[in-house]
Image (cartoon, rainbow, N blue to C red):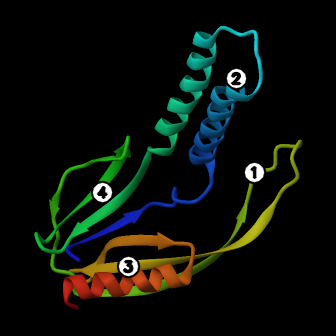
Amino acid sequence: MSQFNHRNGSSGINGTRLLGLILIATGSIVLLVPLFFEVNTDPQKIGMVGGGAFLIGLLMISIYSGTLIDFAENRFKEYQSFLWIKIGDWQELPKIEQAELIVHTFESRNTPNGISPTLSQVVTIYKCVLLANGTKFLALDFTKEKNAVAALEKIKKGLRI
């Protein structure tokens, strides 16, 4: 285990990722329907509409961001992924003195707009915080405690702290 990869909050079903999955499903349906039913639409149109939706959906689910830590080379990079290619610059990892888990609970509320109901919920985020030179160097957010604990153990093992 020479690297640790953390995807920022986009790993769930939300926003752009959800729209991408919907476009992939829609494109697949458009492409498959002519195989089972007789349609009067030009096959080229079907291919362009279904294939276009499918490709745009793939593009949308491939966009995310994260942090990659390379323990062997003692470096890290915060990246943006586009078509599953991680784009970002490697930087030297400072001497990490401590890694700890912090639990942060708060009330999340959407902005009332007069049309939608004002929804609120209590949200708990588990943060793996890396401390260097007595200050917070990097914080990785997790929605599940077991994932945060597992990540903290991997980071501590990789950094030998």
Mark nearer the N terminus (4 vs 3):
4
Q: Residue at x 66, y 30 (%)?
A: 32
Q: Nearer the viewer, mark 2 or mark 3?
A: 2
Q: Residue furthest left?
A: 73
Question: In the image, what residue type sits under mark 2?
Answer: Pro
Answer with left or right where residue 54 lies relative to residue 154: right
**Residue annotated with mark 2:** 34
Label 3 secondary element = strand
**Residue annotated with mark 3:** 129
Question: In the image, what residue type sits under mark 1?
Answer: Thr
Q: Nearer the viewer, mark 1 or mark 2?
A: 2
Question: In the image, what residue type sits under mark 4?
Answer: Glu
How crowded pointer 2 is (Cα within 10 Å; few <14, some 14-19, many 20+) is rated as some
Q: Pointers 2 and 3 in contact (CB under 8 A)? A: no
From mark 4 to mark 2, how far is it between C-alphas? 44 Å
Q: Residue at x 65, y 8 (%)?
A: 42
**Residue annotated with mark 1:** 111
Q: Residue at x 25, y 83 (%)?
A: 134
